[in-house]
Image: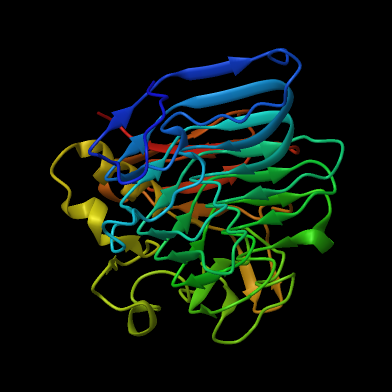
């Protein structure tokens, strides 16, 4: 694990970090903030991946899977932005002011081509928020070409946003499971569109909460059904383009940067994991199974050597990706690529 302070104009590049952060009690009575990389730093991460799991069993401030408390564009190079980063670590907090997959933004900043695969859970009794990518609190913040493919969970009345709270959001996808105790405060993409929100999509079967502030907005934030092919293959190619995205039959669009990186196979494997869909049953556009209400057998993608595992044994998965229901109750399916 790496956790350090860097001054403005610093850039952190090409790091793969692993480890575990566990806090059971408050430190000196203060509500601390945590992240595995560049804590309390102005540095900009590029081409970094974190497998650090974070568990905090006390009150905390802001928790993120990559960097805290802000990423600010270095004044000497305004074109340097956080990009090509992956959080694959899980975050479970008993009570945090906010939890975000990649970053907590409190200054103008940009996030490009980033992916969250981590499970994010905020169990605050005071209704604190969870964001798949970043809180995006400033109207100048930009989140472009980002994917939340992790399990985003708010067990209380707090906000749950698939991508960010606000700011500019463009060409982002929420394809992971979103579970909100207060659906009226949950959205697949963002809570508000303060500047520009265009061409963002979410999986309606995985995140059934609407696009912006709980409502789909055409051309800005729209839900799609994976099983009928409107979110997989080349369905979004004419909208997202081919400069930053890769399209493949029976898979979600994935970020090209992780396909082409040579520093580590971890980037490519995590990119494949994040693009591997669960094809739940649908009858038509208005009648379909959701992640929290599965009544039919379904199928999972097995491309690129992806392996799936059932946590509770309530389903069986054959070699072709056909999933049979065995018993009632909650189950968790996890996919990975064998080394």
The x and y percentages for residue 118 are 51, 39
Residue at left offset 25%, top offset 60%: 256
In the foreground, 73 or 283: 73
Q: How is the image coloured?
A: rainbow
Horizontal side, residue 314 vs residue 226: left or right: right
Circle count = 0
The x and y percentages for residue 281 are 60, 63
Horizontal side, residue 157 vs residue 246: left or right: right
Residue at left offset 24%, top offset 56%: 257
Residue 151 position by quadrant: top right
Horizontal side, residue 123 vs residue 219: left or right: right
Residue at left offset 20%, top offset 38%: 265
**Vertical comparison of 24 with 199: above or below:** above
The x and y percentages for residue 126 are 86, 40
**Vertical comparison of 240 with 58: above or below:** below
Residue 294 visible here: yes
The x and y percentages for residue 48 are 31, 40
In the foreground, 216 or 139: 139
**Vertical comparison of 182 with 57: above or below:** below
Q: Quadrant of the N terminus?
A: top left
Residue 332 visible here: no
Q: Quadrant of the C terminus?
A: top left
Residue at left offset 53%, top offset 55%: 107
**Vertical comparison of 184 with 198: above or below:** above
Horizontal side, residue 100 vs residue 50: left or right: right
In the foreground, 305 or 196: 196
């Amino acid at each position: 694990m790496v956790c350090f302070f860097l001054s403005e104009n610093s850039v952190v590049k090409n790091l793969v970090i692993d480890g575990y952060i566990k806090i059971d009690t408050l430190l000196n009575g203060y509500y601390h903030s945590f992240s595995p990389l560049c804590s309390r730093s102005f540095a900009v991460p590029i081409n970094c991946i974190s497998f650090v799991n974070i568990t905090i069993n006390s009150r905390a401030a802001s928790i993120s899977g990559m960097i805290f408390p802000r990423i600010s564009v270095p004044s000497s190079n305004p074109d340097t932005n956080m990009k090509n980063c992956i959080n694959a670590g899980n975050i479970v907090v008993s009570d945090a002011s906010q939890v975000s997959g990649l970053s907590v933004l409190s200054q103008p900043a940009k996030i490009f081509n980033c992916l969250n695969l981590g499970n994010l859970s905020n169990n605050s009794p005071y209704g604190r928020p969870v964001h798949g990518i970043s809180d995006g609190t400033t109207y100048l913040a930009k989140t472009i070409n980002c994917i939340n493919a992790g399990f985003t969970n708010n067990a209380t009345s707090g906000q749950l946003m698939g991508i960010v709270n606000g700011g500019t959001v463009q060409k982002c996808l929420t394809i992971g499971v979103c579970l909100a105790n207060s659906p009226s405060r949950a959205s697949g993409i963002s809570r508000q569109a303060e500047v520009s929100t265009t061409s963002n999509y979410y999986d309606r079967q995985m995140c059934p909460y609407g696009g912006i502030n709980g409502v789909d907005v055409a051309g800005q934030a729209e839900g799609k059904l994976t099983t009928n092919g409107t979110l997989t293959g080349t369905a979004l190619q004419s909208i997202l383009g081919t400069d930053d995205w890769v399209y493949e039959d029976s898979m979600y669009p994935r970020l090209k940067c992780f396909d082409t990186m040579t520093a580590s196979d971890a980037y490519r494997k995590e990119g494949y994991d994040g693009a591997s869909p669960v094809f739940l049953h649908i009858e038509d556009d208005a009648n379909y199974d959701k992640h929290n209400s599965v009544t039919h057998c379904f199928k999972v993608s097995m491309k690129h050597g992806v392996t799936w595992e059932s946590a509770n044994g309530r389903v069986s998965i054959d070699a072709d990706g056909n999933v049979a229901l065995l018993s009632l109750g909650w189950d968790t399916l996890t996919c990975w690529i064998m080394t």
